[in-house]
């Protein structure tokens, strides 16, 4: 997948997924059409993080911003799939 | 249902959607949890349930006004502690069971969101039970309690949720509908986010669940019949029944409803009931009771009586009973609407029936069972195992409780080793999907990880094989009182029988049985069989070609097992190890079969096959079983030295066809390959010599050995399409088997070497290797070629050259069969070839009917199939290592 050089890049820490996603939400305004979130340090997400991701997806849709998730492990990917969120994001391995 | 849903306000729908959203999120997050995670959560939930058991019982009594506080507290404890005891060591996450010997692993997948309806009779216990099951299986639950029990259920769910979340469960894993309505239930049952409905309650709830179109566990009403048989321990039975029927004032749906008592113990049983606190109603009281507690309009119990004490019910009815009365017992004379008390009564009223016999008692129990209790629970008290078993056969209930209380027995884990539960599956009779005590495994999708397995292979051959010139001398080592030599007139005339006779031990009594026909036919075999009986034979020597040896095999089969039905044994099968028909193992006589072949082709001396000619249907019937394999084979070339040229050619090609087909069979193994390859090598080298120089002893010896080697291969790897085509064609047009094979052989090699339209399913092989194996044969024969395709072409060309050298007609047309005649025959030939067991399941290509027709037409048109790609190459024999790498078989 081609990534523009100026896309904001946020590293999500395992213990602060929700907070970092809020930051990501805030950055959507100036994202220049694309934001990249690095999930490689996240092993599991909880309901609040999941809700934050739902909100993020909704905002991204509203602002026509593309959200790219990188390093999402398959367990989290399955959670997103069950919540029908995978189609709202792009994934980079 | 639609009307109900349409009555929901937007606010109510938003509320329900909110609950579902929480549960759905929790269920998705829960999928990431490990077994250790869930076990860490379940244990404190159980402790919390135990601690709050009495509190929750109080709430339930307060809200529902049903049952007994102490009993409800006990039920809460059973629902937590007993259930935990069952589930604590169970694996419910990831791989849950492994069967290494079968290559199977069962893997748990949570369901997601479970919509759970809980009853008024066991409200909090059911909620506690389902919460523990849900956490153990990583599911979220939306509870919808009975509207008259929702507050206590809500509290039970809240306690479970708080404890679970505190120990790591996802928030929202349990949600509970406040003030639930039928419209709420209808909406939730049909919701796309609900994966399973678990409906514990009355018939209406269960029916609605199953009607929703969603997967559902429905657990409904019962009507427990009890048989107290005359051998029963009356004291124990009475105590058990009172314990069970009065537990929580009879609200457990597995509790006893009608006790059928044998006449011999009826009076003493009732006296015991009375002694222990039961009031035995007289006829008037029974009538009054029935009229009061059962609604005559519906035939069902009135809600006013449910879960009430016996004394309260007596007061309402107007019965005068002692203050400490536990149970009201009403004698009835039958079952049905005219006997109102014969239905389910979730209160301490018990019907009793006096039976004059076991038969009558069982009939009445069946009647009770079918009066609303199918699939649920039944009870039998007896010391007679026969009665217990009979009861178990005739009564259709998921739980048949023996010599124990019904309600507490059905719950499981107390009086027996059944799975502890608060939900009783009632099977199809009860409109349910299971008869089980509902447990954690019903809250899982169990996936099966099935590894590729290989069935054990085999290499089964006669006990002894003797070969080379004068091998017949080995007959001397087989003592026999009475030996029958089966042969044909030509061989007898040629002096072969005399050679055999000379080599038998001197004391052997010998009788010669001559079979006149070329191919064994049923009547011929039966006539020859008479000699075996007459001479009380203990040994049979088959001296002849395939026909004679096949006849001897069938004679042995029928002699040893007269009950063998040849027509049945010849039934088609797909896999010899799994076929329906079994060959007889019980033997009334014993007979040793020694086979001495006089042709070099069929290999019948070592095979487990026998072919009979069915005159009526005009086709061959193949019998196949390793019990048909001769005990001893003597492969002595002196018996083939005088074989006519045509027979040498035809049988030699039969030998090669066996080897080719075994070589590319999907049942081929290194054991069969070794024999097949050697047979092909010997056949290509020595068959032309034996044909052109019949007196060449070496060529005759090698061809005789080749035929035996090929047979050892195909006995264990079977043959293929070539034989199926040849059987059909040969039988229809009276063409010798070897010649029919020859007409098909080049075409079948080309066919099997090309990419199949349909592959033959074969766990034994890791890849399609037929073309590579033909190429290996080409290498072995030194035919040259660089690519596999070239080598296959060279092999086909070499086969055609061999057929030419043997003066074998190269097309069906060359046999003088007109195109019109053949065209008319082809449809039948195709059907017969397809039904022929020869190719199933061993031919590397699964033939389509159209492909069989095409092969027949190619054989009709004949020669010129291919031109050799490189006929001048020097031999390029590969070493064994390269062969193994290229042909990854078995």
Image (cartoon, coloured by chain):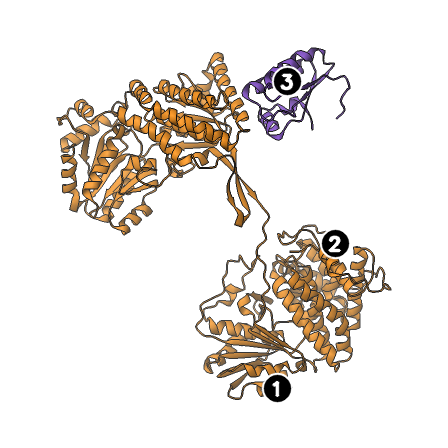
Distance from disc 3 to disc 2, alpha carbons, whole Å, reads: 53 Å
Distance from disc 1 to disc 2, alpha carbons, whole Å, reads: 49 Å
The chain in orange: B
Mark 1 crowdedness (10 Å alpha carbons): few <14, some 14-19, many ≥20:
some
Q: Are marks 1 and 2 on the same chain?
A: yes
Label 3 resides on the chain identified as A
Image quadrant in which the C terminus of chain B is located: bottom right
Q: Residue furthest right?
A: B872
**Nearest-to-viewer mark from 3 and 2:** 3
What is the drawing colour of chain A? purple
Q: Is residue B407 above or below residue B313?
A: below
**Nearest-to-viewer mark from 1 and 2:** 1
Disc 3 element: helix
Mark 2 crowdedness (10 Å alpha carbons): few <14, some 14-19, many ≥20:
some
Q: Is residue B26 above or below residue B91?
A: above
B2 left or right, relative to B294: right
B415 left or right, relative to B774: left
Q: Position of residue B38 (x, y in %)?
A: 48, 29
Residue B783's label in the rendered image is: none
Disc 1 element: helix
Residue B499's label in the rendered image is: 1
- Reading the image, the residue beneath label 3 is A57
- Reading the image, the residue beneath label 2 is B754
Label 2 resides on the chain identified as B
Q: Position of residue B267 (x, y in %)?
A: 14, 41
């Amino acid at each position: 997948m081609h990534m523009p050089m100026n896309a904001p890049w946020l590293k999500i820490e395992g213990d602060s997924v929700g907070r970092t996603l809020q930051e990501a939400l805030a950055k959507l305004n100036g994202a220049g059409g694309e934001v990249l979130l690095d999930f490689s340090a996240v092993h599991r997400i909880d309901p609040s993080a999941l809700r934050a991701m739902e909100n993020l997806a909704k905002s991204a849709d509203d602002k026509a911003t593309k959200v790219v998730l990188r390093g999402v492990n398959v367990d989290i990917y399955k959670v997103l799939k069950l919540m029908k969120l995978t189609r709202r994001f792009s994934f980079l391995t | 249902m639609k009307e109900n849903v349409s009555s929901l306000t937007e606010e109510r729908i938003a509320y329900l959607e909110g609950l579902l959203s929480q549960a759905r999120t929790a269920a998705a997050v829960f999928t990431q949890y490990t077994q250790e995670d869930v076990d860490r959560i379940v244990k404190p939930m159980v402790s919390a349930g135990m601690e709050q058991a009495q509190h929750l019982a109080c709430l339930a009594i307060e809200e529902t006004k049903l049952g007994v506080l102490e009993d409800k507290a006990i039920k809460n404890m059973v629902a937590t502690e007993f259930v935990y005891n069952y589930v604590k060591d169970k694996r419910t996450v990831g791989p849950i069971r492994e069967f290494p010997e079968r290559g199977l692993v069962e893997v748990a997948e949570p369901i997601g969101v479970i919509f759970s309806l809980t009853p008024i009779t066991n409200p909090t216990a059911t909620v506690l039970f389902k919460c523990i099951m849900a956490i153990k299986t990583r599911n979220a639950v939306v509870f919808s309690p009975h509207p008259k029990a929702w507050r206590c259920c809500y509290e039970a769910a809240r306690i479970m949720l708080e404890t679970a979340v505190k120990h790591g469960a996802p928030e929202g894993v349990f949600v509970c509908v406040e003030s639930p309505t039928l419209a709420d239930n209808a909406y939730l049952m049909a919701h796309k986010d609900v994966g399973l409905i678990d409906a514990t309650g009355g018939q209406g709830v269960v029916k609605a669940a199953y009607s929703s179109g969603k997967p559902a566990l429905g657990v409904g009403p019962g009507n427990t019949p009890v048989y107290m048989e005359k051998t029963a321990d009356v004291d124990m039975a009475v105590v058990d029944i009172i314990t069970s029927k009065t537990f929580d004032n009879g609200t457990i749906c597995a509790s006893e409803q009608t006790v059928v008592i044998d006449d011999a113990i009826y009076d003493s049983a009732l006296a015991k009931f009375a002694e222990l606190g039961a009031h035995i109603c007289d006829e008037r009281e029974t009538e009054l009771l029935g009229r009061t507690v059962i609604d005559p309009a519906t035939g069902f119990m009135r809600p006013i009586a449910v879960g009430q004490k016996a004394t309260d019910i007596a007061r309402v009815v107007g019965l005068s009973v002692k203050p400490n009365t536990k149970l009201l017992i009403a004698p009835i004379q039958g079952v049905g609407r005219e006997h109102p008390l014969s239905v389910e009564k979730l209160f301490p009223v018990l019907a009793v029936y006096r039976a004059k016999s076991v038969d009558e008692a069982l009939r009445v129990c069946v009647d009770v069972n079918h009066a609303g209790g199918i699939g649920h629970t039944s009870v039998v008290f007896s010391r007679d195992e026969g009665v217990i078993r009979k009861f178990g056969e005739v009564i259709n209930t998921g739980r048949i409780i023996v010599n124990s209380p019904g309600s507490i027995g059905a719950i499981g884990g107390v009086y027996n080793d059944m799975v502890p539960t608060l939900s009783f599956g009632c099977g199809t009779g009860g409109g349910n999907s299971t008869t089980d005590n509902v447990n954690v495994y019903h809250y899982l999708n169990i996936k099966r990880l099935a590894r590729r397995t290989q069935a054990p292979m085999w290499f089964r051959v006669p006990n002894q094989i003797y070969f080379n010139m004068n091998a017949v001398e080995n007959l001397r080592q087989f003592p026999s009182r009475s030996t029958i030599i089966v042969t044909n007139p030509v061989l007898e005339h040629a002096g072969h029988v005399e050679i055999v006779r000379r080599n038998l031990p001197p004391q052997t009594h010998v009788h010669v049985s001559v079979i006149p026909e070329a191919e064994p036919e049923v009547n011929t075999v039966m006539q020859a069989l008479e000699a075996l009986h007459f001479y009380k034979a203990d040994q049979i020597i088959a001296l002849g070609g395939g026909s004679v040896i096949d006849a001897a095999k069938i004679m042995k089969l029928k002699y040893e097992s007269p009950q063998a039905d040849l027509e049945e044994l010849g039934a088609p099968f797909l896999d010899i190890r799994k076929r329906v028909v079994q060959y007889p193992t019980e033997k009334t006589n014993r007979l040793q079969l020694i086979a001495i072949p006089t042709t070099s082709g069929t290999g019948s001396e070592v095979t487990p096959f026998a072919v009979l000619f069915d005159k009526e249907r005009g086709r061959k019937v193949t019998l196949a079983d390793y019990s048909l394999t001769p005990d001893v084979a003597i492969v002595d070339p002196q018996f083939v030295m005088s074989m006519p040229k045509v027979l040498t050619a035809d049988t030699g090609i039969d030998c090669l066809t066996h080897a080719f087909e075994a070589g590319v069979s999907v049942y081929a193994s290194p054991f069969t390959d070794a024999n097949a390859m050697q047979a092909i090598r010997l056949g290509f080298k020595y068959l032309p010599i034996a044909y052109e120089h019949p007196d060449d002893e070496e060529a005759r010896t090698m061809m005789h050995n080749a035929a035996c080697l090929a047979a050892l291969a195909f006995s264990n790897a079977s043959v293929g399409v070539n034989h199926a085509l040849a059987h059909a064609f040969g039988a229809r047009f009276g063409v010798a088997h070897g010649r029919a094979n020859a007409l098909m052989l080049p075409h079948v090699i080309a066919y099997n070497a090309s990419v199949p339209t349909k592959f033959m399913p074969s766990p034994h092989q890791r890849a399609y290797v037929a073309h590579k194996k033909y190429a290996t044969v080409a290498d072995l024969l030194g035919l040259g070629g660089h690519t596999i395709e070239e080598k296959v072409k060279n092999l086909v060309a070499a086969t055609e050259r061999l057929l030419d050298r043997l003066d074998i007609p190269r097309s069906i047309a060359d046999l003088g069969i007109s195109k019109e005649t053949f065209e008319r025959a082809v449809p039948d030939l195709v059907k017969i070839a397809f039904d022929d067991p020869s190719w199933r399941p061993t031919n590397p290509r699964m033939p389509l009917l159209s492909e069989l027709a095409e092969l027949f037409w190619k054989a009709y048109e004949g020669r010129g199939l291919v031109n050799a790609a490189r006929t001048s190459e020097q031999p390029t024999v590969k070493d064994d290592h390269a062969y193994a790498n290229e042909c990854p078989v078995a």
